[in-house]
Image: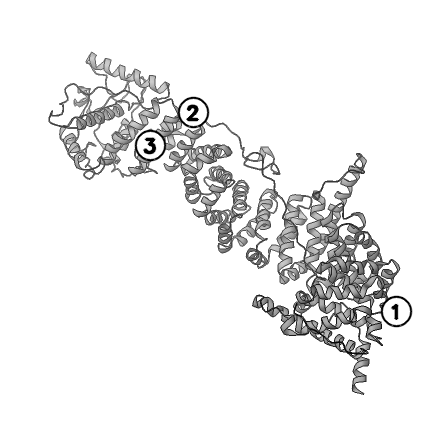
Amino acid sequence: MQASKNKNTEEAEPFYRLSVPKQKTSSEIINEARNVLRTVRTRRPFTPTEDHRKLFGSGSLRAPQNRPPSVFSLHASSFDLAESRPVSGVRLSPLDHKPMLVTFAKDEDSSVSLPKPPADPAEVRKVSSARARLFRRTSQGNFLSAKTVPPDQNEEKLDSEEPAIMSNLCRSNDNCLAEQRSYTPFNDESKQLICKERISRSEREDFLKGTAGKFLFHLRGERSVNSDGRFADEEQQFPCDQMKKPGTSSSWPRSTGWKRRVTGLEDETRINESEEEEIFWHIKILPILHELEKEDNIENLCLACTKLYQALNEGSMLGKRCKRRSVLLKTLYKLVDIDSDPLCLKLAKIILAMKVDGKNLLSVCKLAFKICRNEKNDSIIQNDRLLDCLLEVLRTEDLQKNNEALLYCMGAIKFMSGNAVLLNEMVNKGAVEMLLQLMRQINNIKENDTHFSNLGHLLVQLTATLRNLADLPPARRQLICSGAVSELAVALEQRVNDKDVCTYIVRIFSKLSSYNDFCAALADCSRCYILFLALLKKHQKQQDLVIRILFVLGNLTAKNNQAREQFFKEKESVNTLISLFQTYYELDLNAQKWYHERGGEGKNLPKHPSEAEDVLIKLIRVLANLSIHPSVGAALATAHCVVDLLVTVLEYKSVDDCEELVINAATTINNLSFYKVKSSAVQDKKLHIAEILLKLLMSNNMDGVVEAVRVFGNLSQYHEICDFIIQKKIYKFMIALLDAKNQDVCFSACGVLLNLTVDKNKRALLMEEGGIGKLVDCLQDFGPADWQLACLICKTLWNYSENITSAASCFGEDTDTLLVLLTSLLDEELALDYSLDRDLRDNHKLYWEREFKPVAEKLLDRIQTHLSFLPTVTITPF
């Protein structure tokens, strides 16, 4: 009696392929649905490399007149000599008397007593000769002379006992000193004072003793300065004896303050520099500057610049510490006029290392930009460590004061980031954190600030560089750890009207959201969804921006169930997607119309999707991924506007026109058809959907065929669709697909056949086209490796054999094979492969125990119950 009751219960409950079980979590639904609900993958939007390196790319919306230029002229005159003066390290004491200003009026009644020219004719000739040489060389652009003024004839010579090399060294030093001092002009059109200074014998002897045992600049401490402005161990001589007379002494007060005003920069620097610095300058630096002045060969000039940088670094004269940096920088600025990138690279490195500012900082950053703009210079840039200098500028310079200089500095770094070697070097030197720190500073500048607009240009260069850095795994890790998501989101929100900035930031997101860790960090940024929707509305027709935002949203919704729900709940989220669909659907239709009107009919369309098609692909992918969430999917299934646009795609596009677009649309319909909800738009349009899917089902595209079969697998739960399948002979096609030797194809086809066997009047169809035998073959081929498919086949055979009277009449010649097969598959030791990885084995065992085993045992019991005799069963391992 109990057995009869159980039998009646079994017969009354045929297996459906799909059912929505009660009291199950969303994760259980997703796991059980297998390929019914699927996320959609797609290619990341392609970003072509610019043909030429520019400050702003060819796709920039900035008008040429509203953006800084990428091409400009740069000469020595671009630098400001007045800004080259060193910062004085000596604080002067105030003068006790009120000095009288020096004027150069020609009025004879002037109350200012000016120095008179020397009375000695020889001295007059000597001064005139010096002036002529000075002005001649100044007009030729030479700041330093290649020749030296002969030393004083009365000056004592070195003892003959000194080594010859030391004698030459000292004479060279004297010559350098004499030359340096002889060309310090007094800026008066009518009169000039020549002030000769020489190193005393005692000082020279001390110097020689020091060099005998130590390096040149490792000498005794700084010299003291007398109250009259002279070094304590230094003699001074003036060619004008009358300047010492009482009548003229007031015109030449011998004080430090007056000396600063009259004798010019060289005297000022000598007061502030130590003895070691002065000697090092004349022995090490000055000869190289002479070489730079007289050398014409580019290669030799580059070598000289290399020696100069090394010497400056050796003497700790880089930066603003060098007291004679004015002379040095003037020489370097003059060389900028030489049209040679290798030389300009050397010059830029030294000038940047000297810590110039203002106009000179801007000019040298432009110089570096100009060098880096030429891709052919990448190799020499790698070898000269220009990157270090540019990163130091970003790290130390004031953002608002030097925003234009930082713009070209950042532009140069952006160009460098296009080279793989330099890109890796940037990561190793901490460029990621440095750039994010700079972005934080820019983000702190509000829209009402006068610098806000100009800093947008800088932000374009910065984000473009970060986008290149995002290619490297170490940089990606640094971006995540440094909170890049929040800073990029702030910049995106502040610059929503700047399409260029938005594009580069979205490109960064597009690249990084392909990785799970960054995608999770982005999903945790709650404002990102609002920002993306705002950008889609603001820049709806900017295809390169729209497609990347949709790609990012697709990545977020493919990997995070919370992201699906959060995006869907944002105001106007679905309506924004529908509006975008209408825009790009019309663009695609117009493009097709234009193609056909120009005689394109019959010709092959481009293989790659058009820009409009690519947007539609990414957009539909978002909808497909959203539909994975149970409540979101159910809501979308009732949205007629969403289903309508999917149907529209299947109507006007063939799989041959755009495979990815059509398959994505079919996948989304399949996901939505999974939900049996009231007022389902899919249910309302199920017959129309079935009709348009026939075109895809009969195509030569196997991926398209499988997707169409999946949709029929869900829709075949409705009697109307089952009748349609019978009417259109689609069931024969499903049986034929069982021979595909592909698990996914067999799984989808078997699902349709399972739903057909629910109807008692349609079960006999399995006998046609050898359906029973093909199901048994699929069970044998795929059973041990795919317990879900094995379960589906057993359910189909269970439904088919509901009214069985004899196993032989029901299953025919496949009865014995099926009996042996089921017995083997139900033997745990034979069925489960324990050589597999433990996790994989546990997963197999879970599906075997929960899904396959219950159904297979019932089917085996039914077959054995209706056998006229029991065959001898031989179990063989798989």
Residues at marks 1 and 3 touching, judged by CB atoms closer than 8 Å = no
Residue 799 in percent (x, y) is at: 80, 71
User: What is the three-letter code of the residue carrying label 3?
Assistant: Leu
Residue 325 appears anywhere in the view: yes
47 displayed left or right of 18? left
Q: What number of labels is visible?
A: 3
Residue 210 in percent (x, y) is at: 17, 35
Give the foreground label among 1 and 2: 1
Q: Residue 674's mark?
A: none
Residue 836 in percent (x, y) is at: 58, 66
| Residue for badge 2 | 338
Classify 702 as above or below 384: below
**Label 1 to label 2, Cα distance in Å?**
94 Å
The residue furthest top is: 121
538 displayed left or right of 457? right
In this rendered view, identify the residue nearer to me: 573 or 585.
585
706 displayed left or right of 177? right
SS type, badge 3: helix
User: What is the three-letter code of the residue carrying label 1?
Assistant: Asn
Image quarter of residue 206: top left
| Residue for badge 1 | 761
Q: Earlier in the sequence, mark 1 or mark 2?
A: 2
